[in-house]
Amino acid sequence: MNSTSSISTLVVAVLKIATTFGLLIAITSGCSWDERPVRKSAGASATGSNSANGGAIGTQSASNSSTQNIRNPNIPEGTPSFRFANKDYVLVSSSDIVNQYIPFGETLQNWKSMFALRKFPNMKTPGEAVSNVTEKLKVDHPETRFKVTRDPKTGDHGVDFVIWSQDKQETEFDVHIYQQRNGGVIGKMFFMKGYGEDGHIALIKKVADEKESLTKAVFGFNFPTFIEP
């Protein structure tokens, strides 16, 4: 692809379907992914036990939990939100198929990180969803490296990868989790984006240094329950 739109095109395609960079597929076990409701008002913390600061996940100490649970008072009352990596993510787009959350203060035009939940009612299995993503990566981004993770106990599948536009004006790190839900599949996705050549270098370096902790934090995160419009 020859333009910065290639990154956004892949994100849209993924939502619609379902170091050195080479090809790596690793199958591991023991992963566990859950979901819970987001909080809609200050003081109603639904995700206070989630964090990802330097790769730390899980329950915080009593001294830290009160800090982690603080909701930005500028977030409008009633706005669904949750906290991840010391940032408040707010719901900015909702349909009967897709929910999108970005850090409070960012927009859909300039976001640097995003959480999304996407329903795939006609998808048969989480494995099929991941295969759709990896096959598209092989065609559109043959230079990328991706890792597929499978939980044999639940049948959940995850995949993470880095992609960038040919001119390196947009770079993206993705972590996707696919689970069987209500006869179909639901995708739980986390994105980080870098803009411009400096952003490309910074994100590539961050992923090289912190990929394991970043993916572990997302895999261990209690995603919000899908909100119907």
Image (spheres, grey):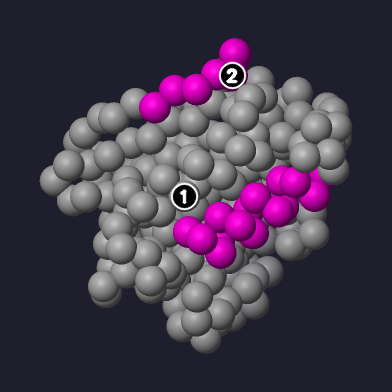
Q: Is residue 61 left or right of residue 93?
A: left
Label placed on residue 102 = none
Q: Callout 2: helix, strand or loop? A: loop
Which picture quadrant has residue 167?
top right
- First reached walking from the N terminus: tag 1 or tag 2: 2
Residue appearing at x 64%, y 34% in the figure: 141
Q: Where is mark 1, residue-wise?
A: 132
Percent coordinates x, y for residue 76 in the rendering: 64, 77
Q: Callout 1: helix, strand or loop? A: helix
Q: Which residues are the magenta region?
A: 4-25
- At label 2, the amino acid type is Phe
Q: Is residue 208 above or below residue 33?
A: above
Residue appearing at x 31%, y 63% in the figure: 124
Q: Where is mark 2, residue-wise?
A: 21
Q: Is residue 14 magenta?
A: yes
Q: In this view, does 85 lie above or below 72?
A: above
